[in-house]
Amino acid sequence: MKKMTIREARQALSRLDRILEEEGEVTITRRGRAVARVVPVSGKRAIPSHKALRESMPRMRRGSGRLVREDRDAR
């Protein structure tokens, strides 16, 4: 793990990807205290299917069409 001051991090921003490849993690400090930790993104996240997304959502008691109509009528 590499430690850098905020000033060093700003100057190294263009090559930060290479630093992360070498070090794996960078801690950014201000006046000797850690204020941030930069870690590489670990791979791509799998995009859930629409079916899995729908199944993970709770069922509504009333249909959305009914809710929209009630909202419009209330205006």
Image: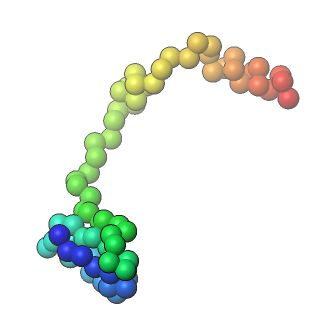
Q: Is residue 47 visible?
A: yes
Residue 13 picture quarter: bottom left
| Residue found at the far right of this picture | 75
Placement of 8 over or under 56, stated as above or below: below
Seen as rendered, the residue at the extreme left is: 22
Q: How many marks?
A: 0
Q: Residue 17: in sight, yes or no? A: no
Residue 71: quarter of image: top right
Q: Residue at x 27, y 70 (%)?
A: 27
Q: Residue at x 33, y 70 (%)?
A: 34
Residue 43's spot in the image, x, y percent?
A: 22, 53
Q: Is residue 28 left or right of residue 71?
A: left
Residue 61 in the image: state x and y as whole percent: 58, 12
Q: In the figure, is residue 41 to the left or right of 1?
A: right
Position in image of residue 49 (x %, y %): 35, 32
Front one among 62 and 9: 9
Counting from the top left corner in percent of width and height, residue 2 is at 20, 74
Q: Residue at x 37, y 80 (%)?
A: 31
The image quarter containing residue 63 is top right
Of the 4 image quadrants, the one containing the N terminus is bottom left
* Direction top: furthest residue: 61
**Is the C terminus in the top left, top right, bottom left or bottom right quadrant?**
top right
- Colour mode of the rendering: rainbow
